[in-house]
Amino acid sequence: MTMPDNFAELAIMMGGIFSLFVAAGHSAFYRLFHWRSDFEKMTILNRKVLYTIHVFLTLFFFLFGVVSLAYVRELSSGRGLGGGISLSYGLFWLARLIWQIMYFRPSSIPHDLKLLLFHYFLIATFIVLSACYIFPVLAV
């Protein structure tokens, strides 16, 4: 990994690092959210489907973090395939931001300060991730 030449490259590098943190956070969900007890209440098929989706989503975030750090110049160019991939990943995080705001409204969160802070932490994280990947495309 080399030092970025411009702000677009710095944005992609930051996005890659954030993606790795998101992958690490997802790897703790099973324990953090007590999925063992929740999964016991589900049919085996639903349990396997949900767990499979989660494992591969975590792997996706990890791989995209690595790709972001390995191909900073291509993704930060804002053009061609690199620009298309950056824009797609940025729009993914923008959609996830909107989902967080609309679906996990504070009024629907149990009155737990930790959960509420976690909600706002996720909003900030999704803002940063969407900006990191959309900015290089808009800067062209």
Image (cartoon, grey):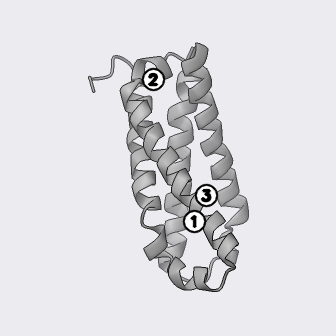
Q: Residue at x 53, y 77 (%)?
A: 35
- Mark 2 and mark 1: Cα distance apart in space: 35 Å
Query: Which mark is on residue 51?
Result: 1
Q: Vertical placement of 30 versus 24: above or below?
A: below
**What amino acid type is highlighted by mark number 2?**
Ala
Q: Residue at x 59, y 36 (%)?
A: 90
Query: Mark 3 highlights which residue?
Result: 53
- Mark 3 and mark 2: Cα distance apart in space: 31 Å
Q: Is residue 124 visible?
A: no
Q: Residues within 10 Å of mark 2 (few under 14, many from 20)?
A: many
Q: Residues within 10 Å of mark 1 (few under 14, many from 20)?
A: some
Quadrant showing the C terminus:
top right
Query: Mark 2 highlights which residue?
Result: 8
Q: Residue at x 45, y 53 (%)?
A: 22
- Secondary structure under tag 1 reads helix
Task: Of the two numbered discs 2 and 1 on the same chain, state the one appearing first in sequence.
Answer: 2
